[in-house]
Image (spheres, rainbow, N blue to C red):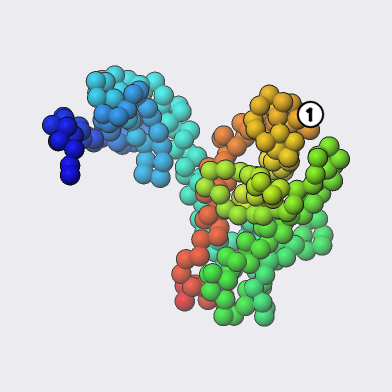
Amino acid sequence: MPNPFRLMGPKPRTIKRDAFELVLDDGRAIEVQRVRDPRARRIKLSVDERGARLTLPTRASKVTGERFAVEHRDWLALQIRRHALDAMPRLQPFQSDRLPLRGGEVPLRWQTGRLCMVQREARDDAATVFTVSARAGSAAIARALRDFYEAEARADVGRWLPRYLGGLPRPPRRFRFKQMSSQWGSLAPDGSVALDLSLVLARPSAFEYVLVHELCHLIRPDHSRMFWREVESRCPRWRDERDYFHTEGRRLKAGLRALLDAGGDINAGTGKPG
């Protein structure tokens, strides 16, 4: 039976939307969606894949909201530029000649072969070679790239881990790499460490900081002051790395999604949709 008091109460106010034009310092005019939300408690600017948005509480005036947006034009322009970087193009077989890795890019060379795989050549300045079989579709190409990135990430962890094992109560049980929506790492109760695969696209010092962070949870399972002391003793510049993720994290995660996006089938011989 419906609650009669609920029926007697005031109807929830609806969210109202419109838009206005904002001119940035470089002269560009952008459209900002204005959202008047009765649940909002403060004025808020945000940018996502849909564009710029200004959220207003019910009592805030349009003039106050637009003034807030003008005062934060520099921040807005920066976020828009970052979202433009987030929209990385897909990997184009036999066309892309660079591959993102460890905060930079490495040369990429394509060839045909029996199996679909990605390998680093032995020389330091050599290209990464992407071998594509004649019948490979985009899913197989994405799998090969994912396997390559995971192998590179495991190699990094394998280089760093020995220097930290001595101060741990026990070694981590195992490492798993996966795509995470918001986290960069986690420690399971059984001692298994999960790491975001997009860390392999980050600068190495930031990746190593995430590893240290999760290893320190083997000592302290919380985020107390004692925990952060353990982190700082092993990674004195951890604050710089945390700030790096605040500015670059979204781009890294979006970049990996774009690279591993298995779209339409690819003809390996021509690099065109099949």
Judging depth in this view, the residue of 107 and 67 nearest the camera is: 67
* x then y, percent, for residue 111: 66, 73
Query: Residue at position x 13%, y 31% from top?
Result: 8
Return the residue at label 1.
233
Query: Residue at position x 79%, y 51% from top?
Result: 158
Q: Is residue 131 above or below residue 104?
A: below
Crowding around mark 1 (Cα neighbors within 10 Å: few <14, some 14 to 19, many 20+) is few
Q: Is residue 262 above or below residue 58?
A: below
Q: What type is the residue that disc 1 sits on?
A: Ser
* x then y, percent, for residue 213: 70, 37
Classify residue 110 by image quadrant: bottom right
| Relative side of 101 to 32, left or right | right
| Relative side of 237 to 78, left or right | right
* x then y, percent, for residue 225: 68, 24
The N terminus sits in image quarter: top left
- Residue, far left: 8
Q: Is residue 129 above or below residue 176?
A: below
Judging depth in this view, the residue of 118 and 41 nearest the camera is: 41
Judging depth in this view, the residue of 109 and 61 nearest the camera is: 61
* x then y, percent, for residue 233: 79, 29
Classify residue 39 by image quadrant: top left
The answer to whether residue 209 of the structure is visible from this angle is no
Classify residue 23 by image quadrant: top left
